[in-house]
Image (cartoon, rainbow, N blue to C red):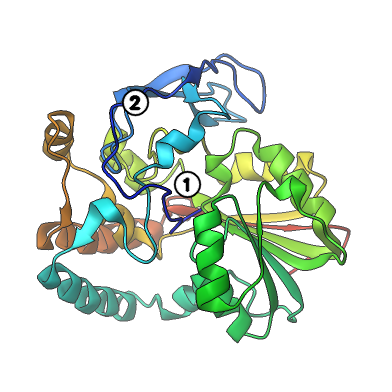
Amino acid sequence: MDDVPYLNKDPMPTILIGTETQSICYLCGNAGKILHHNLDDCLFGAPGAWSFRQCPNPDCGLIWLDPRPTVSEIGKAYRNYYTHGQPNGTRQTRPARMLRTILHAASIASLGLRAERRRYKRMYLDQMPTGRLLEVGCGNGKRLARMQAMGWDVTGQEVDPVAADYVRAARGIAVHVGPLETMDVAEKYDAVIMSHVVEHVHDPVALLLTCHSMLKENGLLVVLTPNAASYGHRKFGMVWRGLEPPRHLHLFTCRTLVQMAQRAGFSRNQCWTTSVGADGIGQGSVLPEEAIQSRQGKQQQLVATRDVLRGFWFQLAASRIFRTDKNSGEECVLLATKGSAGYE
């Protein structure tokens, strides 16, 4: 769902999003406690005030949105979401774009992240024999094109018909339009990947169950999602980029991701965190004074050099923290195998 085009490029009119309450933990059934209260959508201007709860069970700790948009209303939260190739609400100034290119390359090289960045870009499948691959929530198809160039036989799934049409026309890649469970699978897949999708869905275990059913025996599921236990969440708190209310419905840690994979029938699960994309988190974590401007109807329209510098310095700090705390990365990476054999 990252880089998913929104359906309406016009400014969002005054609308209401229908919601439902969800005070009980989705995974373990405990009553959640308020973690963040009365949040705005400072990124894409969806209306409403939103709160997150956290499960107090130390063996769980799941974080979720309450209230949350209903299944029938969730589309309204995406009206001003990403366009093809460039987010509408976060266009970069020319100096910012040039500075980010320079600083990003410098940080990757100086922090020794080049190998990790390469694995991340390849969805950690660089050591696996190629075969049939499905991307759930393929967005603009950029990742599918990269995997295709590696030798994979790729197919996409997307709920947004505009995005699907773009991938077909610009990339020449087949895309199923509609919920994953409506997709007919004549031949099962060797790998199913999803990047920043699972946090957007109302029933993530059901999503993983569907992925499980679409995989061959010993097939691999790869999931990337924001890490609720990250250094960035601790530092930025209620303005951490990974929250993104009201589109992020659940926020996970490695513990909760593994629990979900087990419930979905995956027999061997590995999960770790990575800080390789921390610059984007630092850049996108709206500072308190900017959040106040957003509440006053002055939502930031341009990514400026100060935002790029914030992302750069945060990348340096997050990488330093990660050296001694391997659970502090901004994203969780889950590798889940169907069947008894695993993937190293």
Mark 2 or mark 1, whichever is nearer to me: 2
Work out whether 320 lies above or below 151: above
Tell me how far mark 2 sits from mark 1, CA to CA: 31 Å
How many marks on residues?
Answer: 2
- Residue topped by disc 2: 15
Q: As shown in the figure, which amino acid type bears the numbered disc 2?
A: Ile
Work out whether 258 lies above or below 314: above
In screen coordinates, is 72 left or right of 268?
Answer: left
User: Could you say where residue 238 lies in the image, as x and y percent from the top left?
Assistant: 30, 33
Q: Secondary structure at mark 1?
A: loop
Residue 342's tag is none
Instruction: Give 81 or 208, whichever is nearer the viewer.
Output: 81
Q: Residues within 10 Å of mark 1 (few under 14, many from 20)?
A: many
User: Could you say where residue 302 lies in the image, as x and y percent from the top left?
Assistant: 16, 56
At horizontal 43% and vertical 34% (from top left) the residue drawn is 76
Would residue 252 be visible to someone looking at this image?
no
Which quadrant of the figure has residue 82?
bottom left
User: Could you say where residue 115 lies in the image, as x and y percent from the top left?
Assistant: 47, 80
At horizontal 60% and vertical 57% (from top left) the residue drawn is 194
Work out whether 245 lies above or below 319: above
Q: Which one is earlier in the sequence, the residue at label 2 or at label 1?
A: 2
* Quarter of the C terminus within the rendering: bottom right
Q: As shown in the figure, which amino acid type bears the numbered disc 1?
A: Asn
Residue 227's tag is 1
